[in-house]
């Protein structure tokens, strides 16, 4: 019986990580607005992140000689360009698109930017949450300037 009471108490402590606060004035509304702001930061970050992945993936699809697309480098029958495999024609092999490093660099910057935006949004969420609990309201200047500059 003692063991069961101990397990129930431990479960209650582990699962109730959310702190209960008194709903005076606009406390609940402020916390809900803070959560919506966190979701907006994550939405913006995921947009940057997924755009970077899509840009890199679409460029890899254009490069018909890419070993990452076909899994096989070179001009073997399985690694032949897609158009030649579908039509069966022996068309001359087109050179791969130039500037692959530029696309990879832009994709990397978009992914890194998205990751930083999501990280900042999460840190800002906890900062605002602690300020609301103490009865203060922090102004957000750094995040807005960061997103505008990116």
Image (spheres, grey):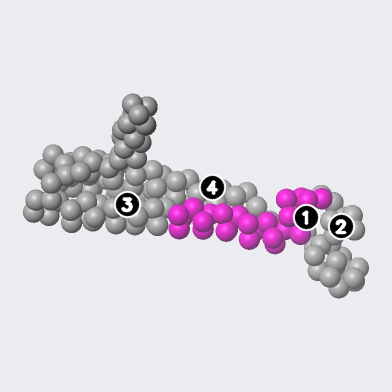
As drawn, is 104 to the left or to the right of 81?
left
User: Quick check: 143 above or below 5?
Assistant: below
Which residue is label 4 attached to? 108
Instruction: Assign a secondary structure to mark 1.
Output: helix
As drawn, is 47 to the left or to the right of 99?
left
Q: Residue furthest top?
A: 2
User: Residue 87, position in %: x, y?
Assistant: 86, 73
Q: Range of the magenta residues? A: 46-72
Which residue is label 1 attached to? 70
Instruction: Assign a secondary structure to mark 4.
Output: helix
Q: Earlier in the sequence, mark 3 or mark 1?
A: 3
Q: Which mark is residue 38?
A: 3
Q: CA distance from mark 4 to mark 2?
A: 30 Å
As drawn, is 12 to the left or to the right of 109?
left
Q: CA distance from mark 1 to mark 2?
A: 8 Å
Residue 71 is one of the magenta-drawn residues: yes
């Amino acid at each position: 019986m003692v063991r069961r009471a101990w397990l129930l108490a431990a479960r209650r402590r582990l699962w109730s990580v959310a702190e209960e606060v008194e709903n005076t004035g606009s406390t609940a509304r402020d916390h809900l607005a803070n959560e919506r702001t966190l979701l907006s930061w994550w939405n913006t970050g995921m947009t940057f992140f997924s755009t970077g992945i899509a840009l890199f993936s679409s460029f890899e699809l254009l490069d018909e000689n890419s070993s990452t697309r076909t899994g096989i480098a070179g001009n073997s029958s399985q690694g032949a360009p897609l158009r030649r495999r579908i039509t069966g024609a022996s068309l001359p092999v087109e050179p791969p698109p130039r500037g692959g490093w530029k696309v990879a660099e832009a994709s990397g910057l978009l992914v890194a930017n998205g990751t930083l935006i999501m990280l900042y949004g999460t840190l800002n969420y906890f900062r605002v949450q602690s300020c609301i609990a103490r009865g203060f309201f922090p102004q957000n200047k750094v995040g807005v300037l960061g997103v505008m500059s990116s």
